[in-house]
Image (cartoon, rainbow, N blue to C red):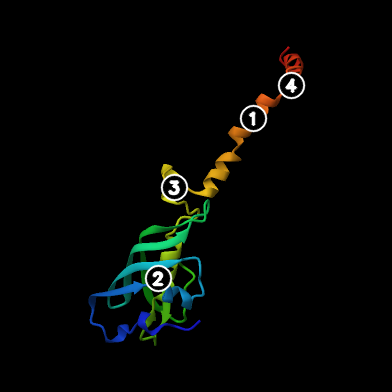
Amino acid sequence: MRRLAAYTIPFVGLKLGKHQFEYDIDNEFFDHFEYDEFNSVDVKIELLFEKKTTMMELTFKASGTVNVDCDITNEPYDQPIDSSLFLVIKFGNEYNDEDEDLLIIPHGEYEVNVQQYIYELIVLSLPIKRVHPGVEDGTLKSDVLDKLEELSIDKKEKNNEEDIDPRWDKLKNLLND
Protein backbone atom coordinates (compact mmCIF):
# COMPACT_ATOMS: atom_id res chain seq x y z
CA MET A 1 0.00 0.00 0.00
CA ARG A 2 1.18 3.45 -0.87
CA ARG A 3 2.16 5.69 1.98
CA LEU A 4 0.52 9.08 2.11
CA ALA A 5 3.19 11.74 2.49
CA ALA A 6 1.01 13.94 4.72
CA TYR A 7 1.11 11.27 7.46
CA THR A 8 4.86 10.73 7.40
CA ILE A 9 6.76 12.36 10.26
CA PRO A 10 10.50 12.89 9.72
CA PHE A 11 11.60 12.59 13.35
CA VAL A 12 15.34 12.87 12.65
CA GLY A 13 15.05 16.67 12.35
CA LEU A 14 12.91 17.12 15.46
CA LYS A 15 14.37 18.29 18.76
CA LEU A 16 13.93 16.24 21.91
CA GLY A 17 10.62 17.00 23.59
CA LYS A 18 6.96 17.24 22.68
CA HIS A 19 5.63 18.11 19.23
CA GLN A 20 2.00 18.60 18.17
CA PHE A 21 0.51 17.41 14.86
CA GLU A 22 -3.09 17.74 13.65
CA TYR A 23 -4.84 15.90 10.86
CA ASP A 24 -8.33 16.41 9.40
CA ILE A 25 -9.64 13.06 8.20
CA ASP A 26 -12.29 12.87 5.49
CA ASN A 27 -13.59 10.38 2.89
CA GLU A 28 -10.49 10.77 0.74
CA PHE A 29 -8.35 9.22 3.51
CA PHE A 30 -10.54 6.10 3.60
CA ASP A 31 -10.67 5.91 -0.21
CA HIS A 32 -6.92 5.33 -0.07
CA PHE A 33 -7.57 2.24 2.10
CA GLU A 34 -10.48 1.16 -0.16
CA TYR A 35 -12.76 1.21 2.88
CA ASP A 36 -16.31 2.16 1.91
CA GLU A 37 -18.33 1.52 5.09
CA PHE A 38 -18.63 5.25 5.83
CA ASN A 39 -20.98 7.66 4.06
CA SER A 40 -18.97 10.65 5.22
CA VAL A 41 -16.16 11.30 7.68
CA ASP A 42 -15.31 14.40 9.69
CA VAL A 43 -12.72 13.43 12.29
CA LYS A 44 -9.91 15.48 13.74
CA ILE A 45 -6.77 13.70 14.93
CA GLU A 46 -4.50 15.38 17.46
CA LEU A 47 -1.12 13.69 17.71
CA LEU A 48 1.26 14.42 20.56
CA PHE A 49 4.67 13.22 19.45
CA GLU A 50 7.23 13.07 22.26
CA LYS A 51 10.79 12.43 21.13
CA LYS A 52 13.18 11.01 23.73
CA THR A 53 16.79 9.91 23.40
CA THR A 54 16.10 6.17 22.98
CA MET A 55 12.42 6.07 21.99
CA MET A 56 9.38 8.06 20.92
CA GLU A 57 5.90 8.16 22.41
CA LEU A 58 2.85 8.96 20.29
CA THR A 59 -0.55 9.80 21.75
CA PHE A 60 -3.37 9.93 19.21
CA LYS A 61 -6.73 11.52 20.07
CA ALA A 62 -9.62 11.24 17.62
CA SER A 63 -12.78 13.33 17.86
CA GLY A 64 -15.56 14.02 15.38
CA THR A 65 -18.31 12.14 13.58
CA VAL A 66 -18.61 9.36 11.04
CA ASN A 67 -21.82 8.98 9.05
CA VAL A 68 -22.74 5.28 8.87
CA ASP A 69 -25.84 3.23 8.08
CA CYS A 70 -27.85 1.71 10.92
CA ASP A 71 -27.64 -2.10 11.04
CA ILE A 72 -31.35 -2.37 11.87
CA THR A 73 -33.04 0.21 9.64
CA ASN A 74 -30.29 1.04 7.14
CA GLU A 75 -30.95 4.74 7.87
CA PRO A 76 -27.81 6.91 7.83
CA TYR A 77 -26.81 8.67 11.05
CA ASP A 78 -23.78 10.43 12.57
CA GLN A 79 -21.83 8.21 14.96
CA PRO A 80 -19.69 10.29 17.33
CA ILE A 81 -16.01 9.34 17.56
CA ASP A 82 -14.00 9.99 20.70
CA SER A 83 -11.07 7.66 21.30
CA SER A 84 -7.34 7.60 21.86
CA LEU A 85 -4.29 5.43 21.20
CA PHE A 86 -0.88 5.33 22.85
CA LEU A 87 2.08 4.02 20.84
CA VAL A 88 5.73 3.59 21.79
CA ILE A 89 8.36 3.51 19.06
CA LYS A 90 11.74 1.95 19.82
CA PHE A 91 14.76 1.17 17.70
CA GLY A 92 15.91 -2.38 16.97
CA ASN A 93 17.61 -4.59 14.41
CA GLU A 94 14.54 -5.03 12.19
CA TYR A 95 11.02 -3.69 11.70
CA ASN A 96 8.45 -5.30 14.03
CA ASP A 97 4.84 -4.21 14.53
CA GLU A 98 3.44 -7.41 16.08
CA ASP A 99 2.63 -5.70 19.40
CA GLU A 100 -0.24 -3.22 19.12
CA ASP A 101 1.30 -0.76 21.61
CA LEU A 102 4.92 -1.05 20.48
CA LEU A 103 6.54 -0.41 17.11
CA ILE A 104 10.17 -1.38 16.57
CA ILE A 105 11.90 0.29 13.64
CA PRO A 106 15.46 -0.29 12.33
CA HIS A 107 18.25 1.94 13.67
CA GLY A 108 18.79 3.69 10.32
CA GLU A 109 15.18 4.93 9.96
CA TYR A 110 14.62 8.66 9.92
CA GLU A 111 10.81 8.89 9.55
CA VAL A 112 7.64 7.13 10.65
CA ASN A 113 4.31 6.91 8.85
CA VAL A 114 1.21 7.03 11.11
CA GLN A 115 -1.58 6.56 8.53
CA GLN A 116 -2.24 2.91 9.51
CA TYR A 117 -2.61 3.82 13.20
CA ILE A 118 -5.04 6.63 12.39
CA TYR A 119 -7.07 4.29 10.19
CA GLU A 120 -7.26 1.60 12.89
CA LEU A 121 -8.06 4.14 15.62
CA ILE A 122 -11.13 5.42 13.74
CA VAL A 123 -12.41 2.08 12.44
CA LEU A 124 -12.00 0.30 15.77
CA SER A 125 -13.66 3.09 17.75
CA LEU A 126 -17.02 2.38 16.11
CA PRO A 127 -19.38 -0.03 17.87
CA ILE A 128 -19.74 -3.49 16.37
CA LYS A 129 -23.49 -3.09 16.06
CA ARG A 130 -24.40 0.32 14.70
CA VAL A 131 -27.83 1.36 15.91
CA HIS A 132 -29.45 4.70 15.06
CA PRO A 133 -30.08 6.75 18.24
CA GLY A 134 -33.70 7.17 17.15
CA VAL A 135 -34.20 3.41 17.29
CA GLU A 136 -32.97 3.25 20.88
CA ASP A 137 -35.16 6.07 22.17
CA GLY A 138 -38.13 5.32 19.90
CA THR A 139 -38.20 8.65 18.03
CA LEU A 140 -37.21 7.30 14.59
CA LYS A 141 -40.12 6.64 12.23
CA SER A 142 -39.21 4.15 9.53
CA ASP A 143 -40.98 1.64 7.31
CA VAL A 144 -38.44 -0.98 8.34
CA LEU A 145 -39.20 -0.46 12.04
CA ASP A 146 -42.93 -0.66 11.38
CA LYS A 147 -42.49 -3.97 9.56
CA LEU A 148 -40.24 -5.34 12.32
CA GLU A 149 -42.88 -4.40 14.89
CA GLU A 150 -45.57 -6.07 12.84
CA LEU A 151 -43.56 -9.28 12.59
CA SER A 152 -42.35 -9.32 16.19
CA ILE A 153 -42.73 -12.51 18.23
CA ASP A 154 -44.96 -10.92 20.87
CA LYS A 155 -47.64 -10.02 18.32
CA LYS A 156 -47.50 -13.45 16.69
CA GLU A 157 -48.03 -15.16 20.05
CA LYS A 158 -51.08 -12.98 20.78
CA ASN A 159 -52.53 -13.67 17.34
CA ASN A 160 -51.93 -17.40 17.72
CA GLU A 161 -53.66 -17.51 21.12
CA GLU A 162 -56.76 -15.90 19.67
CA ASP A 163 -56.89 -18.36 16.75
CA ILE A 164 -56.71 -21.53 18.89
CA ASP A 165 -59.73 -23.80 18.78
CA PRO A 166 -61.28 -24.06 22.29
CA ARG A 167 -61.42 -27.86 22.00
CA TRP A 168 -57.64 -27.94 22.43
CA ASP A 169 -57.92 -26.42 25.91
CA LYS A 170 -59.02 -29.79 27.32
CA LEU A 171 -55.87 -31.38 25.93
CA LYS A 172 -53.75 -28.69 27.57
CA ASN A 173 -55.33 -29.64 30.90
CA LEU A 174 -54.01 -33.19 30.44
CA LEU A 175 -50.46 -31.83 30.44
CA ASN A 176 -51.06 -30.06 33.75
CA ASP A 177 -52.35 -33.20 35.51
Q: Earlier in the sequence, mark 1 or mark 4?
A: 1
> What SS does tag 3 mark?
loop
Of residues 173 and 20, the one nearer the viewer is 173
User: Can residue 37 be seen in the rendering of this structure?
Assistant: yes
Q: Is residue 80 above or below residue 13?
A: above
Q: Is residue 159 above or below residue 19?
A: above
> What SS does tag 4 mark?
loop
Disc 3/disc 2 C-alpha distance (Å)? 32 Å
> What SS does tag 2 mark?
helix
Q: Residue at x 52, y 56 (%)?
A: 74
Residue type at mark 1: give it.
Asn
Q: Which mark is residue 41?
A: none
| Quarter location, residue 120 | bottom left
> What SS does tag 1 mark?
helix
Disc 1/disc 4 C-alpha distance (Å)? 13 Å
- The residue carrying mark 3 is 140
Of residues 125 and 50, the one nearer the viewer is 125
- The residue carrying mark 1 is 159
Disc 4/disc 2 C-alpha distance (Å)? 63 Å
Disc 3/disc 4 C-alpha distance (Å)? 39 Å
Q: Are marks 1 and 3 in contact (CB under 8 Å)?
A: no
Q: Residue at x 46, y 61 (%)?
A: 68
- The residue carrying mark 2 is 118
Label 3: few (<14), some (14–19) or many (≥20) C-alpha neighbours in 10 Å: some
Q: Earlier in the sequence, mark 3 or mark 2?
A: 2
Residue type at mark 4: give it.
Asp
Q: Is residue 162 above or below residue 117?
A: above
| Quarter location, residue 48 | bottom left
Q: Earlier in the sequence, mark 3 or mark 4?
A: 3
Residue type at mark 2: give it.
Ile
Disc 1/disc 3 C-alpha distance (Å)? 26 Å
